[in-house]
Image (tube, rainbow, N blue to C red):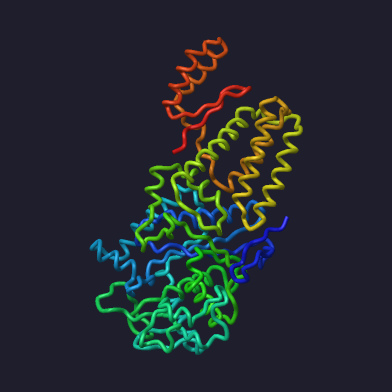
Amino acid sequence: MVLKVHNTLTDEIEEFDPISEDKVKMYVCGTTDYDYIHLGHARTYVAYDMMVRYLEWKGYDVLYVQNITDVGHLTEEGEDKVEKKAKQEKTHPMQVVEYYMRNHLSDIDKLRIKRPDIMPRATGHLIDMIEAVKELEEKGYAYERNGSVYFDISKLEEYGELTNVNLGELEESGRIEESSEKKSPQDFALWKKAAPGQLMTWDSPWGEGFPGWHIECSVMSNKYLGEKFDIHGGAIELAFPHHENEIAQNKGLFGKHPVKYWVHTGLLNIKGEKMSKSKGNFIKVKEALEKHSPEVIRFWILSSHYRSPLNYTEEKIREAKRRLEKIILFVNRLRKLNKGKGTKGELTQRVKEFEKRFEEKMDNDFNTPEALTELSKFINEANKKLDKGEYEEGDPSYVYSKIKEILDIFQVIPRETNGNLSSLVENLIDLREDLREEENYELADEVREKIQESGIKIEDKKEGTIWMKNLK
């Protein structure tokens, strides 16, 4: 089966044909670590985590690079976000970055997001950035003004191809920063002159300063993935101006478009507005994890297509929890029935058919909501057959192995579903089953209540009691 992905550059669903047959090179814009990450970040990085895992499931070798911005990302007032936070906290900017970066990494670990293969920091690539700016200046794509260096948009035959942006309209709307230093309002900074008292500055051919936000990603993606790579990702809000400016820089440096497929995620909204730090309407990942299991958060995110806007409501998360519980109980039922090798029958054939339908849905631009719908349909069908005893000895083992492979892509099954249950609860489950066999249902119901009070959800099936730890 052929994977197809939506390419923002063409606004079309295209067959995925990587530059190298079995190798996929992927770059995703990372965070600026001056605060805790929020659910908007989680939505983006869970989506790319799913893509990496699915590509690997299909047999690709993926090299995944995601940067960390620790300098150069400015507020609307032109102040470095990290430096601003350092002033507020009365500490050094690098202390700010280290603290929030460690929290950021801890949060993505808890969300079971596999860390990218390379996570370069902007400040570790300053020499490369200065050399890139010098090269753009030498080639006539950049000019210096009062210690700052700007990219000259007029030198490009085409600008704005990713988003079909109309620069004239943007200029009128005020979305383009004006400056008396720039030849044109559309030009953007490659290197900025340091302000008096600024801490995060470095010496350069143009004097003390710091790199522009856009040149950072061009330099780091090129260093680790080359002049042309397969996938560039990020939230859709980065398409303009950040990604348009990356394209402009790479055309100036290398004479070519840097990316084959631009794959953007949709926004996370709360009460009708985009969730963002600047709006102050964000929910920190660490806060969300206090209320909800990481697997529930992942399932909620993946229940929506990665390009669609995702609305945050507690009801949507509760719905995700209910759906996920059914999946976990099914997996635990298969574990209980797993007798190893044996004759395989119709249920094995059914899971093979499901696997094909699953791949068809995922191959259609990583359509996780439709893939999860197919999973729910299969679970309903399989549970009916298990209830009726319509399966062969080897079916549960085979079905379990296939379902586990698929669910590993989504990372929504708790790692220790049956792991650390106390011996007391295990004894209670055994006791209840004995009481039911003796038809002492009143006492069995009391034991059931005790089990549920211990944070355990149980279901009675033909083959016995299956259970799971309650999700948050």
- Could you say which quadrant of the image residue 280 lies in? bottom left
Q: Is residue 435 left or right of residue 450?
A: right
Q: What percent of the width, then of the height, locates residue 283?
A: 38, 52
Q: Residue at x 38, y 66 (%)?
A: 70
Residue 349, placed above or below residue 152: above
Q: Residue at x 73, y 43 (%)?
A: 353
Q: What percent of the width, then of the height, locates residue 343?
A: 76, 30
Residue 288, placed above or below residue 120: above
Count of numbered circles in the view = 0
Instruction: Pick the quarter of the image with the C terminus.
Output: top left
- Could you say which quadrant of the image residue 76 lies in? bottom left
Q: Is residue 93 left or right of residue 367?
A: left
Residue extending farthest left: 90
Q: What percent of the width, then of the height, locates residue 324?
A: 54, 40
Instruction: Pick the quarter of the image with the N terminus.
Output: bottom right
Q: Is residue 433 left or right of residue 126?
A: right
Q: What percent of the width, then of the height, locates residue 359?
A: 68, 50
- Could you say which quadrant of the image residue 328 lies in? top right
Residue 278, placed above or below residue 388: below
